[in-house]
Amino acid sequence: MAVTFSNVNSASGLKKLDEYLLTRSYITGYQASKDDISVHAALTRIPSAEYVNLLRWYNHIEALLRISGVAGDGCGVIVEGFAPITEEAVATPSVTDTKAAAAEDDDDDDVDLFGEETEEEKKAAEERAAAVKASSKKKESGKSSVLLDVKPWDDETDMKKLEEAVRGVQMEGLLWGASKLVPVGYGIKKMQIMMTIVDDLVSVDTLIEEHLTEEPINEYVQSCDIVAFNKI
């Protein structure tokens, strides 16, 4: 069944996309496809840093488009108000097209094939190399979606400050997601919070033992438990 998105450029639409991508690397399936390009094309501007999951996905698709294009068919996506992406928009340039372009370049007598590389060309080459490196790193490093139970000391614990303290823990490979308060009895509520981690960079046990239950966060947090742990 096709995934449907509406008002993707509104605050509510961006928030929905961000939450949707919390536990997903792509719009559908396990590789980039024309479904990703359809949503990418519908966005009129780069997502702000407020939408961390959406911005991560957007930059990844941007890098793929600059490097080699996207060839996956996808499972089907509907972006209300936007026409579906055509095959030409997602396909990698063919060998024939590449040779034709090269032949045209050969016919241009004004082109200095042995001239020095301009600053713009050097910069473009460096950007391509950085994009390839970033893309390769993402492929090599697995990711996981983790749901944590964060328990306060008692019913007098300020849960807003507790959440601020938890989200204040920042490290490479860690992205905090949505959270909610869940009653546990006697007026006490615990916080459940989602996070996405890069497996090679973040250990959940170390995160809990050395950050979330240590000073100064342990002023609010009594303990943390892993509720769900899923590979992405």
Image: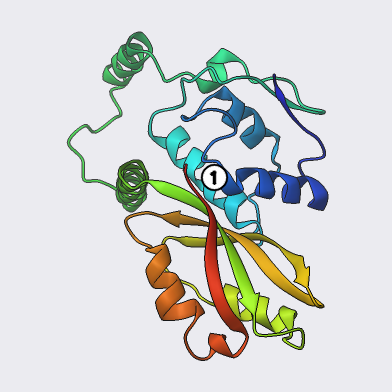
Residue on which the image places disc 1: 57
Amino acid under label 1?
Answer: Trp
Q: Is residue 97 above or below residue 226?
A: above
Decide if residue 36 is on the left or right side of residue 100: right
State left or right for residue 35 relative to residue 181.
left
In the rendering, at what x and y percent does residue 193 appear?
A: 63, 62
Residue at screen point 63% across, 86% down = 220
Quadrant of the drawing holding the N terminus: top right
Q: Is residue 75 visible?
A: yes
Label count reads 1
Residue 154 x/y as whole percent: 71, 85
For residue 75, what is the image quadrant? top right
What residue appears at the point 33 percent right and 48 percent down from the top-left corner? 141
At 69% from the left and 44% from the top, the residue drawn is 17
Give the residue displayed 30% in from the left and 47% down from the top.
Answer: 133
Of residues 64 and 95, the one nearer the viewer is: 64
Where is residue 173? Give x, y as percent. Answer: 42, 60
Q: Residues within 10 Å of mark 1 (few under 14, many from 20)?
A: many
Query: Is residue 10 visible in the rendered structure shown here?
Result: no
- Is residue 21 depicted above or below 71 in this figure? below
The percent coordinates of residue 59 (x first, y second) are 51, 47
Residue lying at the far top in this picture: please name it.
Answer: 96
Q: How is the image coloured?
A: rainbow
With respect to residue 115, does 78 lie above or below?
above
Q: Give SS at disc 1.
A: helix
Q: Nearer the viewer, residue 34 or 106?
A: 34
